[in-house]
Every structure is written in structure tokens, then in C-alpha cells.
Image (spheres, rainbow, N blue to C red):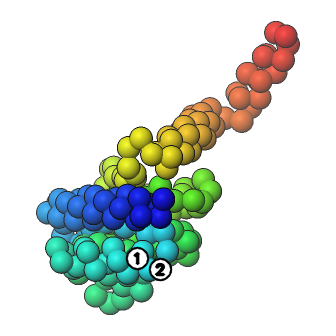
Amino acid sequence: WLEMSRAVQAHTDSAMVQHAVDLARKDRARHKDGGVLLVADTTSHASRLTAMCSAHVCTGDFASLESSEARKYGVVVVTKDRDRGYNSAVRLGALVTGAYAGNAASRHQIRGRLRRLGQCRKEVRFVTVVMENSMLHLLHQRHSAVDTMNITLEQLGQRFSADVLERLAQGERSDR
């Protein structure tokens, strides 16, 4: 199993790097300081992804986000636990990640590094790379369904004021 796991991870890493490099090039063609935030599972995984990306575009690590030369990096690689405390990723137009163990709050937080005040793009791309028909694929689909439901509820709350939602809930209770 370990050998199979390593083979799947190697192919997934290659696909992640390809997506990150392609998206970085496209984003930088439209936004000269743009690029991609590439999320790795662990520190050693981040080192591996950084080395793979560096063969194609200028690639930095978490520290590069705040450096004086931050804008030269088309791909910035961070680990999944770097989900809070920085705003400088707003210059990037896409996020590429794998399907890693974690919670929805962390996934939401790391997406929020790009989708925040100061973002000049109307849309930011989020790509999750996972091997099809694997256990991770199934888990990712289930987590995505829950995340979508949470987003839908959040959008309802933004669209309708609390008193309208409360009246709807009261009407539902009186119908029972």
C-alpha cells in the first residue's frame, strides 16, 4: 500500500504543479504581479512542490509573501496550516491545493487569504487536485457538498435580513 500511496502522491504532485504553473502564467499575463498560492500538506511536501515549480516559474515560500521582492514570485508555496495572519496573498489570482485532512474552517480561511478586500479580480480560481476514484476523491466530494451548503446558507443570510429569516422560520413552525 505504501508504494501505491507514493505513486498516487507523485502523480498528484505533478498535476498540482502543472495547474499552478499554468494558472500563474495566465494570471501574470493579465496582472503583472499576479500568481498562484499553492498549498502543500507538510513542510517536506512544500519543499518538493517548490522544487518542482521552480523549474518553470519563479517560486517562493511563505516568507516570500512579505518580502520586498514578493511580486516577482509567480507561485507561492505554503503549508495547509498557514491559513491565518497574512493579507499579502491578495495579489494572487488562484489557489491550488490537494485534498488534505483538515477542517472546513481552515479551508475557508486559506481561501480567504485571496478573496478579501484589496483583491482586484472579480473572480478568484480555486482548484483542488485529487486522483479520481480514490478514497480522497470521495472524501473531497463529501466535504465539498458540506462546504457548498454552508456557503448557500451564508448567502441567504447576506441576502435577507435576520428578521425576514426569523419570520420564515416562525411560519414553518406554525405550519407543523
Q: In the structure shown, which secondary structural element does the residue marked by tag 1 occupy?
A: helix
Q: In the structure shown, which secondary structural element does the residue marked by tag 2 occupy?
A: helix
Residue 29's place in the image compared with 73, above or below, is: above
Residue 65's place in the image compared with 26, above or below, is: below
Of residues 168 and 27, which is closer to you in this image?
27
| Residue at the (18%, 70%) spot, across then down | 32
Quadrant location of residue 4? bottom left
The residue singled out by tag 2 in the image is: 43
Q: Counting other residues with Cα less than 10 Å from the Cα at mark 2, is it few (<14), some (14-19), or many (20 or more)? A: some
Of residues 128 and 116, which is closer to you in this image?
128
User: Which residue, as the protein is rendered here, is positioned at the far top?
Assistant: 175
Q: Amino acid at mark 2?
A: Thr
Question: Where residue 44 sits in the image (x, y, percent)?
Answer: 44, 80
Question: Where residue 171 sits in the image (x, y, percent)?
Answer: 79, 16
> Is residue 39 found left or right of 165 in the rendered image?
left
Is residue 128 among what the camera can see? yes
Q: Amino acid at mark 1?
A: Ala
| Residue at the (44%, 60%) spot, across then down | 5
> Is residue 143 found left or right of 129 in the rendered image?
right
User: Which mark is drawn over residue 27?
Assistant: none
> Is residue 129 found left or right of 148 in the rendered image?
left
User: Which residue, as the protein is rendered here, is positioned at the far left?
Assistant: 29
Question: Where residue 173 sits in the image (x, y, percent)?
Answer: 84, 17
| Residue at the (48%, 59%) spot, across then down | 1
Of residues 167 and 43, which is closer to you in this image?
43
For the residues labelled 1 and 2, say whether their Cβ atoms are less than 8 Å apart.
yes
The residue singled out by tag 1 in the image is: 46
Is residue 144 among what the camera can see? no
Distance, label 1 to label 2, CA atoms, is: 5 Å
Q: Counting other residues with Cα less than 10 Å from the Cα at mark 1, is it few (<14), some (14-19), or many (20 or more)? A: many
